[in-house]
Image: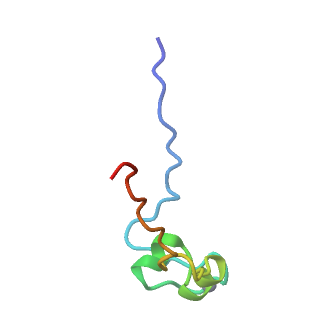
Amino acid sequence: MDQEQPPLETELVAPGPMPVRCRLCGRPLTGAASRRTGLGPACDAKLHPAGPDIRTRRHEVDQEALPGL
Ligand SMILES: [Zn+2]
């Protein structure tokens, strides 16, 4: 039986740290977070604007008083 051989065309992966570029503006990224997201800080902020209600405390509803107390 023939054994399936893995393709040898795997030279696309370059060894070592390769420069990561912003996929939006193409600028080289240096920050670890930017490399992970593939976006520069500016472009990341553009795509993911921090809304005013992301981590702000909303009007908290008071705990309902237990009925029967
Ligand atoms: Zn960018």
- Quadrant of res 14: bottom left
Q: x and y percent of residue 32 in the render? A: 40, 78
Where is ligand 1, by quadrant? Answer: bottom right
Give the residue at x 47% y 30%: 5
Q: In this view, does 57 lie to the left or right of 51?
A: left
Give the residue at x 39% y 73%: 17
Q: x and y percent of residue 63 in the render? A: 41, 63
The number of discs equals 0
In front: 59, or 32?
59
In front: 17, or 51?
51
- Quadrant of res 22: bottom right
- Quadrant of res 44: bottom right
Image position of 61 with respect to 56: above or below: above
Q: Which residue lies furthest to the left in this view?
A: 69
Give the residue at x 63% y 82%: 26
Q: x and y percent of residue 39 in the render? A: 56, 78
Image position of 8 with respect to 1: above or below: below
Image position of 58 with respect to 30: above or below: above
Q: Is residue 63 left or right of residue 38?
A: left
Give the residue at x 65% y 83%: 46
